[in-house]
């Protein structure tokens, strides 16, 4: 005989008659319309804790913070302290005998007098002395009570500050937990609508069955530090067709080795994109001769570079601005150097052509000057001057 515990039926249509408690049956017999499993396999707490502890990334350590209850507890503690503060002020306003003035300013005397008053059991005590002992006992009890409550209140405040600092879980991690926490139907292969079945198909029933639902999403936190995922990694993890590439076939969880391998592939893709954007931009700007075309190409390349950084990295907004500005600055410097080189080549070619023309005219001027007689100086000068105007 094997002790078995009856599970809630997997089909919603038969869930209405699943109220039977633990039963004892043969390990080889299965009741018609019901499914039985060993108790260790039917314990939802055991199953779900095994699932969470087997996650290598610890991204499934998702729990509720119970913000409303925690804040209400802080309000209760604050109210208690406010009442104690009022009681202290009332004791401070009470009339006290002159003999107690020195006692209130010395903690050692105050403590000794209070302890003596608590131990004093004599009945025939003067009225003034009895009032003094009563005040001492009341003050000492109030001091001890305040000490305990203030410590409890401050510890609660500090703990809540640490709890609020915990990061919220990723939506994909919540979906992963939900698919395990809620048992799928036998014909539900995709199991995307687990939230609608949480009330009847969760492996932990009661109020705990809805702890991953939408109304509690803002109250969830993850204990492990979140692993930063770029949008490309999120796409792979969210799509069922791509998720199989990083899933462990035996446990159904994300395999740490496959996940690291995928991260390396995405890193190489990022590096290749950066090289393509930089080298391709330089080649395109060099081959494009039009100045207006270069400016348009510069704008398109800068915009595309910014979107690629946003898509394949986990860079923040200011990091994207800085990297895009640096990329645009490199391209602007390249365009400026290219234009300067083209301008210098044009001016050099113009100067060389002018020099060649000047050299070709100089012999003609010499020959004309030598053709005149020496005595006709004015004619020679005029001829040289006219020929010099050919420049």
Image: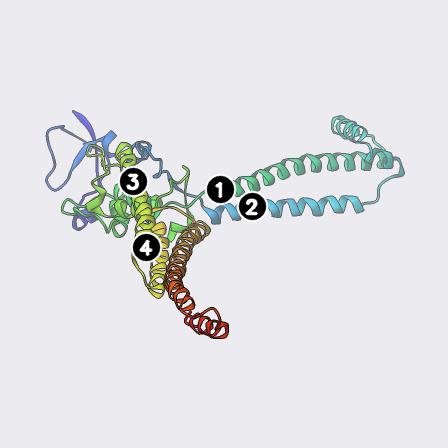
Q: Which residue is mark 3?
A: 268
Q: Which residue is mark 4?
A: 286
* CA distance for labels 4 and 2: 67 Å
Instruction: Locate residue 269 relative to residue 379 in the image: left or right.
Output: left
Kindly tell me whether residue 352 is visible in this rendering.
yes
* CA distance for labels 1 and 4: 56 Å
Up-down relation of residue 87 to residue 30 (above or below): below
> Does dot 3 land on a helix, a strand or a loop?
helix
Kindly tell me whether residue 211 is visible in this rendering.
no
* CA distance for labels 3 and 1: 37 Å
Pick out the residue farthest to the right: 98
Q: Earlier in the sequence, mark 1 or mark 4?
A: 1
| Residue density around tag 4, few if under 14, some if 14–19, many if 20 or more, within 10 Å | some
Closer mark to the observer between disc 1 and disc 4: 4
Examine the image and state in which quarter residue 337 appears.
Answer: bottom left
Q: Earlier in the sequence, mark 1 or mark 2?
A: 2
Q: Which residue is mark 1?
A: 163
Q: Earlier in the sequence, mark 3 or mark 4?
A: 3
> Does dot 4 land on a helix, a strand or a loop?
helix
Closer mark to the observer between disc 3 and disc 1: 3
Up-down relation of residue 102 to residue 358 (above or below): above
* CA distance for labels 3 and 2: 50 Å
Closer to the camera, 315 or 334?
Answer: 334
* CA distance for labels 3 and 4: 27 Å
Q: Which residue is mark 2?
A: 74
Closer mark to the observer between disc 3 and disc 4: 4
Closer mark to the observer between disc 4 and disc 2: 4
* CA distance for labels 1 and 2: 14 Å
Instruction: Locate residue 140 relative to residue 194 in the image: left or right.
Output: right
The answer to whether the residue labelled 4 contacts the one labelled 2, judged by CB atoms less than 8 Å apart, is: no
Residue at x-position 36% and y-position 50%: 309
């Amino acid at each position: 005989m094997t002790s078995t515990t009856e599970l809630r039926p997997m089909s919603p249509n038969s869930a209405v008659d699943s109220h039977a408690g633990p039963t004892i049956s043969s390990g080889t017999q299965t009741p018609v319309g019901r499914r039985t499993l060993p108790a260790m396999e039917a314990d939802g707490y055991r199953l779900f804790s095994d699932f969470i502890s087997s996650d290598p990334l610890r991204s499934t350590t998702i729990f509720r913070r119970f913000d409303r209850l925690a804040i209400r507890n802080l309000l209760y503690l604050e109210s208690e302290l406010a009442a104690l503060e009022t009681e202290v002020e009332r004791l401070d306003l009470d009339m006290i005998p002159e003999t107690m003035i020195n006692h209130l300013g010395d903690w050692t005397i105050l403590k000794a007098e209070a302890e003596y008053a608590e131990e004093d059991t004599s009945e025939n005590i003067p009225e003034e002395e009895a009032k003094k002992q009563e005040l001492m006992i009341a003050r000492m009890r109030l001091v001890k009570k305040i000490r305990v409550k203030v410590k409890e209140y401050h510890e609660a405040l500090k703990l809540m500050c640490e709890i609020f600092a915990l990061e919220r879980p990723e939506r994909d991690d919540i979906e992963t937990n939900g698919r395990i926490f809620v048992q799928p139907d036998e014909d539900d292969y995709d199991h995307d609508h687990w939230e609608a079945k949480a009330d009847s198909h969760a492996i932990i029933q009661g109020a705990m069955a809805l702890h991953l639902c939408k109304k509690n999403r803002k109250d969830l936190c993850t204990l492990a530090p979140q692993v930063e995922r770029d949008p490309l990694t999120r796409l792979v993890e969210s799509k069922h067709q791509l998720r199989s590439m990083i899933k462990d076939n035996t446990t159904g969880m994300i395999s740490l080795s496959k996940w690291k391998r995928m991260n390396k592939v995405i890193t190489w893709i990022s590096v290749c994109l950066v090289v393509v954007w930089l080298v391709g931009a330089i080649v395109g700007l060099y081959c494009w001769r039009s100045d207006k075309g270069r400016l348009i190409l510069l704008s398109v390349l800068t915009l595309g570079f910014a979107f690629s950084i946003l898509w394949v990295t986990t860079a923040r907004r200011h990091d994207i601005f800085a990297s895009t500005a640096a990329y645009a600055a490199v391209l602007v410097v390249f365009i400026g150097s290219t234009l300067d080189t083209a301008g210098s080549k044009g001016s050099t070619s113009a100067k060389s052509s002018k020099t060649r023309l000047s050299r070709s005219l100089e012999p003609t001027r010499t020959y004309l000057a030598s053709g005149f007689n020496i005595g006709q100086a004015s004619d020679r000068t005029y001829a040289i001057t006219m020929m010099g105007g050919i420049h």
